[in-house]
Amino acid sequence: MVKSYLKFEQISTFGQICSTASNCIWDSKTEDEATTSRTSAGRAFVGANEDVLVWDLKRGELESRWHVTDNRAQVTVIVRSQNDPDLFAVGYDDGKIRVWDSRTTTIYITFNGHKSAITQLTFDRKGVRLASGARDTDIILWDLVGEVGLHKLKGHKDQITSLNFLSVAQPLKDGDEETVLTNGDEEDDQYLLSTSKDALIKIWDLSTQHCIETHVAQTNGECWALGLSPDHDGCITAGNDGEMRAWVIDQQALARASKEFASGEKVLKDRGTFYRNGKDRTIAVRFHPKRDLIAFHGSEKAIELWRIRNEDEIKKSVNRKRKRRKEKLADQEMQDEPELEDSTDLDLSQVNITEVFVPYVILRTGGRVRSMDWAGGKSSKSLSILLATTNNQLELYDVDAKERKSKDRTIDYNRSLSIDQAGHRSDIRCLALSSDDRMLASASSNTLKVWNAKTHSCLRTLDCGYALCTTFLPGNKIVVVGTREGNLEIFDIAASSLIDTIPAHERDIWSMHLSPDGRTLITGSADKSAKFWELRVVQEEVLGTNRKNPKLTLVHTRTLKTADDILAVRFSPDGKYLALSTLDTTVKVFFVDTLKLYLTLYGHKLPVLNLDISYDSKLVLTSSADKTVRIWGLDFGDCHKTFLAHNDSVLNCQFIPDNRDGNGHHFFSASKDRTLKYYDGDKFEQIQKLEGHHGEIWAMTVAHNGQFVVTAAHDKSIRIWDQTDEQVFLEEEREKELEEMYENTLLTSLDDDGANEKDAEGVESTDPSKQSGQTLIASEKITEALTLGVEDLEIMTEHAKAVQNAKANATKPPAQPPRHPIYLANGNISASSYLLNILQKLPPQHLTDALLLLSFSQLPTLLTFLTLFAEEQRNIPLVCRILNFMLKVHNKQIVSSRLMRVELENLREKLRAGMEKSRREMGFNLAGLRVLGRRMADEGPGFVDENVDEVQESKGKKRTFVSIA
């Protein structure tokens, strides 16, 4: 009989506030309508690994989590639609884009066209198009209404660092006529402005899908960011070493470029270079939407706010500097130079750019800044900035925006709100569960946190040293932490206080373990010693009184010296043996009572980083930096099995503590390769490979009842993997892994072939397409439906002829011939209906990608069915979309083929008849809507809003009061 195992699945993740891979978005509204007043600080939308978290900044609570069940890719960018504030586009590092509705936390559309991580997203002003840029150097324009990709723009040689739509909103005089292009015109957002790490800035004409202008944005390396002014008349690009370059966007030249092809007039004009205070690379440039302020920041712990001077201020500054130069140089030519009395004498295009942009204030933050967003200020005299830092926290700063009455007045700012209690500031280095598995302790470089293992709420936050190991003491009220300084810190969880700090070792305490009887604690250190500590309760005098309070302390009883640093220690469950690993790659087993050497385990090539002993004290499990996990027998010290378990150092390993379900010899291993693996220690088989973390897994602990596993990683998240009732069979798991490998290889080869063909042509614009497992399945379904459909059409055509002949000869009609079972299973539908159902169920993006995989030999069959659809007037828009796409893909073969001309002519006649009928229906409906609109305008409003008590008639009548009964 084949043995089955119970499956472990990730059920929850917590401990992360924001990730370093994504940006943050501020929203003024909150989920609770009662808090949308002035006291509300708004919400923050941030990426947290594979999820999007929505935080209430005032309460510091998590409002919602946008989670996709089958997604393991990390969120890389979030952008909000200007037209619909509830619409968000989220990019992931696997190249997918999901459009979310924030009200219902559901996905509208999923786009899949990029080969690597999404780096930039932007909506147009109408909210109907989305532009995306990725590390694969491509820019794709998506249609949100049609749910398809429009164009893929090629031209950059490195990852895209910014994308912005440009609109033509300036008057254009053409002879005697004057045309004003506004935001509502068809010409709106006709251009796209992009920058890349290749230090180039490009302007794309979206009507022709070509680049009309290219400039070198930075002189000292990559271009990391671009900020576009709210009125689209200028932009600033950012590079290395704090270099900033200002550009003027000539709107009239842009308008002429939209009317004339290759006019030769430059749209982008360089205005000069200036440098900010920080010397790191600038990763963000953000213009304030209403004020004359710009925010710059790199990866340092600061944000720089710069102010844009008005024309009068620039004139005063220039005059002041000229007067100083006169006094200093005393040059006759300079003395004769007149001062600028009127602002009309000043040519802004000739003024040095450093006179236009001046520093305003530098905000010092609590961590390295990852992203920022402008937030609404508490009043008109202040402004707020939302920050997401790399140390896992959100901060909201208030900045004084009053005008400076004197030059020496400093700008005040303060951190008004922060979200930092729900996670650690640095990587979690150790985990420990209480004996009842209800509390979880996690410790990092300066913080100890105690969590509720069920609700994942943070119960206590305590300051500690650089923690390397931790454990609960009996009673689950005391936690001991071993630090890098060699101290043992004892914390009382109930009182939230540090009880005692014991200088236990001279160097790092790498490991500690509590004896099975709960009376002795052993610590292993880099000072080449393992020390035994006895738990005792002593009476401590209270200062100034005669009273004494009981106090738990650790008393040093014995010391075990070794020749090398001790990395891990472990008592056997029966209390007889003590196993410890040292830096010389060996594991030594001692008798606990006499501390005499019992066994020495040789075999690892690099130091053993962790070890464990099974519940029955028969097996020793070791994990090493040599990427292997070994199982040893504790009776003779022989190596039972060596697993090449991971692709990097194996930092943790642990047996399931009990044998309640017969799985006492099953164990888990966690590695720096970001995976957690589940093994059978008796059959030496890998049961499961659990993926989910986006960083090295530093800590792991298994529940005492063996029902769940807790891991913590470099991505600052804590994940709980729970045992489910679903069974796992080893053969099925191996087959799934092989299928995934095959699909990935096949999809990669298909994408590479398509990319090579398109790159060989040297075109700037191509159709966005990317093959996936879903498109492969869809293509197979279409191919199968076409193959079966041709056979069924022949059978049914012959049957129809036989029936007609029988009627003509007045004989009994023949019985219906047997059809394929798939048609009978679907209600005996026709072949054309079956194919149409398949095509209709496919999303538009998957449909085009699936049609790409059809061979040219299947095109005549597809055209035959499209002719049937057009003749039956069934889903004419879908027929036109498929026909246009196939004609575009196989244009050369179709033109050179004479046999397909007759089929296409027949299809054109049928489509024209169907489209004419659809046109008449649409015209009739539009005319009816116009009539209804005029009638409603004549009659006035037919309802009264319950929140409005004053209604003004549309015909110019006075206001009247309406009472609502």
Image: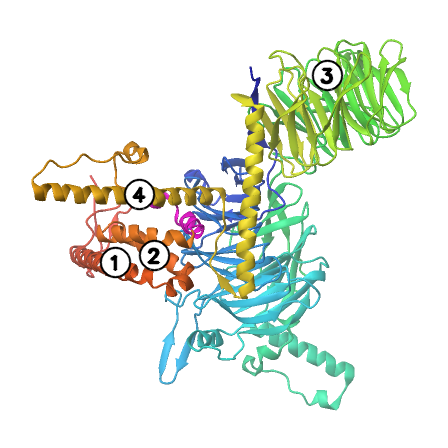
User: Dot 4, how many residues are within 10 Å of its Cα: few (below 14), some (14-19), or many (20+)?
Assistant: some
Please state which of residues 451 and 887 is positioned toward the viewer in this rendering.
Answer: 887
SS at mark 1?
helix
Amino acid at the residue labelled 4? Glu
Where residue 530 appears, as percent x and y from the top left, is 86, 21
Q: Quadrant of residue 74?
A: top right
Give the mark, 3 or 4, whose residue is nearer the N terminus. 3
Residue under label 3: 473
N-terminal of the two: label 3 or label 2? 3
- Give the residue at mark 1: 911
From the viewer's perspective, is the residue at label 1 or at label 3 nearer?
Answer: 1
From the image, tell me which residue sits under label 4.
791
Q: Secondary structure at mark 3?
A: loop
State how far apart marks 3 and 4 are (Cα). 75 Å
In three-dimensional space, the C-alpha distance between marks 1 and 3, rounded to whole angstroms, equals 80 Å
The question of residue 406 being in magenta is answered with no
In this picture, which residue range is highlighted in magenta?
833-854
Q: Which residue was labeled with disc 2? A: 883
